[in-house]
């Protein structure tokens, strides 16, 4: 009797392997959503910095740049730069193509941007940059928004999934002074 009991107990775990397992024990994972873009480093590091309002002090001027992280390696990084508030005309430097998680975004090199900084009156000004992993819409009424992405079809049933873009921002407060 004890032998038969041991035999039955020994075979019980094997029966689970012999019975068809048609039910899915772990559901399929939903498609991965767009990871947020984030600013991880700024140059100058201090959000309050001195800026000399003249082209005669170029060697004293800080270089404005950001290091951003975006886990979506295929995404292009876009940026908008504002001198003053977001109701002013934004400056758009070149886009930073995908390929690596960490990317560098530098201030526009256009003469318009440099001229606008050089002509700031003495006092306090704000320089704000927005970075995003999708393009920006036209800024209307100071509202910064992203262009909507087209939905992607996800197998197995081709369900449309919208993968929204994300953005981050940083502002420097400039203590604008005359060139010494």
Image (spheres, rainbow, N blue to C red):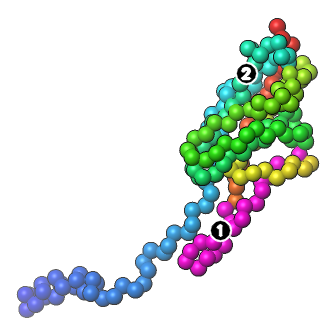
- 71 to 178, vertically: above or below: below
Range covered by the magenta-colored residues: 142-163
Q: Residues within 10 Å of mark 2 (few under 14, many from 20)?
A: few
Residue at image location 44% in from the left, 74% down from the top? 26
Quarter-wise, where is residue 6 in the image? bottom left
Secondary structure character of the magenta stretch overall:
loop
Residue 73: numbered disc:
none
Residue at image location 83% in from the left, 16% down from the top? 55
State the image coordinates of residue 148 (x, y, percent, origin top left): 76, 60
SS label for mark 2: loop
State the image coordinates of residue 172 (x, y, percent, origin top left): 76, 30
Locate the N terminus by quadrant.
bottom left
- Residue beneath label 1, please? 152
Can residue 85 be seen at all in this image of the molecule? yes
- 13 to 92, vertically: above or below: below
Seen from the viewer's position, the closer of residues 18 and 146 is 146
33 relative to 92 in the view: left or right: left
Quarter-wise, where is residue 90 in the image? top right
Q: CA distance from mark 1 to mark 2?
A: 42 Å
143 relative to 62 in the view: left or right: right
Residue at image location 89% in from the left, 39% down from the top? 89
Can residue 124 be seen at all in this image of the molecule? no
């Amino acid at each position: 009797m004890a032998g038969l009991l041991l035999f039955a107990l020994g075979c019980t775990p094997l029966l689970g392997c012999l019975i068809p397992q048609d039910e899915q024990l772990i559901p399929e994972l939903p498609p991965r959503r767009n990871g947020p873009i984030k600013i991880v480093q700024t140059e100058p590091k201090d959000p309050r910095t001195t800026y000399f309002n003249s082209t005669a002090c170029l060697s004293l001027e800080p270089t404005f740049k950001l290091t951003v992280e975006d886990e979506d390696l295929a995404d292009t990084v876009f940026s908008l730069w504002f001198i003053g508030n977001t109701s002013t005309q934004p400056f758009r430097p070149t886009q930073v193509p995908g390929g690596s998680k960490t990317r560098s975004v530098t201030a526009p090199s256009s003469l318009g941007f440099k001229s606008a900084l050089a002509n700031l009156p003495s006092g306090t000004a704000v320089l704000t940059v927005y970075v995003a992993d999708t393009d920006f819409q036209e800024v209307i009424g100071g509202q910064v928004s992203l262009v909507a992405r087209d939905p992607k079809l996800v197998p197995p049933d081709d369900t449309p999934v919208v993968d929204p873009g994300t953005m981050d921002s940083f502002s420097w407060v400039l203590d604008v002074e005359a060139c010494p």
